[in-house]
Image: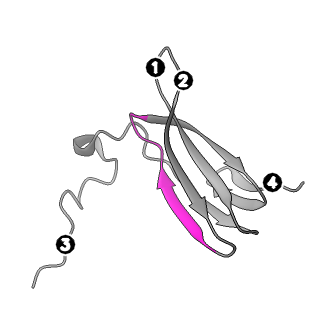
Amino acid sequence: MDHQQPNAGNAGGAERGVNNGDYFVVKAKEQGVTVIGLTRGKDTRFHHTEKLDKGEVLIAQFTDHTSAVKVRGKAVVYTKHGVIDTEE
């Protein structure tokens, strides 16, 4: 059985509509942390929301549709630029 993902050889994601493909990780430090994806374009809008429980981890990627992310609640955000603790 072949477990290879479609487009696995395309790390940049050009075939899937990924702009720069940077990943980020959000780890909830409390119940009910909200992660909100914001759109690209002339009007910035909310397009996706996730609720995380304490200890849950969300791994996400910036795409052609997602240009920014808003995190509400106590969480740690890991990016290639560093680690951000929302309590600090």
Q: How packed is label 4: few (under 14 Cα within 10 Å), some, or many (20 or more)?
A: few
Left or right, 28 with reference to 57:
right
- Which residue position is annotated with label 3? 4
Circles 4 and 1: CB atoms closer than 8 Å: no
**Per the image, is 4 magenta?**
no
Residue range corresponding to the magenta coloring = 56-65
The first of marks 4 and 1 along the sequence is 1
How crowded pointer 3 is (Cα within 10 Å; few <14, some 14-19, many 20+) is rated as few
Q: Amino acid at mark 3?
A: Gln
Pick out the residue farthest to the left. 1
Task: Identify the residue at image location x=31%, y=47%.
Answer: 13
The residue depicted at 64 percent of the width and 53 percent of the height is: 34
Residue 44 sits above or below residue 52 on the image: above
Q: Which residue is mark 2?
A: 44
Using the numbered discs, state the Cα–Cα distance from disc 4 to disc 2 in whole angstroms.
22 Å
Local SS, label 1: loop
Per the model, the C-alpha gap separating discs 2 and 1 is 6 Å
Q: Which residue is mark 4?
A: 86
Quick one: which residue is furthest to the bottom in this view?
A: 1
Answer few, some or many: residues within 10 Å of disc 2's Cα (few below 14, many 20 plus, some between 14 and 19): few
The label nearer to you, 3 versus 4, is 4
Residue 26 picture quarter: bottom right
Q: Which sits in the foreground, 57 or 46?
A: 46
Q: CA distance from mark 3 to mark 4?
A: 36 Å
Give the Cα separation between the discs numbered 1 and 3.
Answer: 33 Å
Quadrant showing the N terminus: bottom left
Name the residue carrying label 1. Answer: 41
Type of amino acid at the residue the image marks with label 1: Gly
Q: Earlier in the sequence, mark 3 or mark 4?
A: 3
